[in-house]
Amino acid sequence: MREDFKIRRAVPDDAEIIAKYNILMAEETESKRLDFNVIFDGVKNLMKMSNYGFYVVAEVNGEIAGTLMITYEWSDWRNGLFYWIQSVYVHPDFRRKGVFKGMYKYVEKIAADDQKSCGLRLYVESGNHQARKTYKNLGMKETSYRLYEYIF
């Protein structure tokens, strides 16, 4: 049975739980340990700089069940913004109950209503088969791109 939940944009009071969930997500999906203070400051700073993105939370009975972050990427090929879905985490107690789907549909509507938007994107660990299946079930298509990075 699906729980009733509320999807909304995050507010500064949500920053601590978002930071904690980011740490749990990194440990679970990539076996990485992140520094809480760095993450917490990063969450608070994005909340102050809405031109870079925003956070979405799902609440069940006042408890944060899931979070995700949206950042923007300008596409000159499309003359529009991609909404990048990042830092997705759903607490284990609320998985398989439609929490991520609810957050995704919430973001999809915001992006579709934004005349500057041209689509949604996300990246996923190649071994995260359950997440990949979820994204495909929502209508997303896997691309041929590979991600490279250089960290300072």
Image (tube, grey):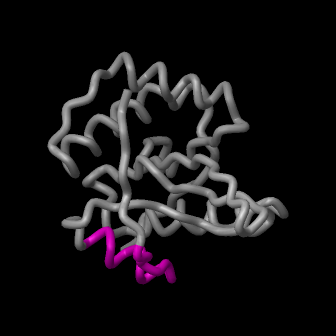
Q: Residue at x 63, y 42 (%)?
A: 53
Q: What's drawn in magenta, residue-wise? A: 130-144
Figure quadrant of the C terminus? top left
Q: Residue at x 15, y 43 (%)?
A: 31
Q: Residue at x 52, y 31 (%)?
A: 14
Q: Is residue 132 magenta?
A: yes
Residues 149 and 111: in front is 149
Residues 30 and 3: in front is 30
The answer to whether 116 appears left or right of 4 in the picture is right
Q: Position of residue 93 (x, y in %)?
A: 27, 54
Q: Position of residue 104 (x, y in %)?
A: 54, 65
- Compared to 135, does 45 lie above or below? above
- Name of the residue lying farthest toward the right: 115
Q: Residue at x 50, y 29 (%)?
A: 43
Q: Is residue 143 visible?
A: yes
Name which quarter of the figure residue 45 lies in: top right
Figure quadrant of the N terminus? bottom left
Q: Is residue 24 magenta?
A: no
Q: Position of residue 72 (x, y in %)?
A: 64, 49
Total numbered circles: 0
Residues 141 and 65: in front is 141
- Name of the residue lying farthest toward the top: 37
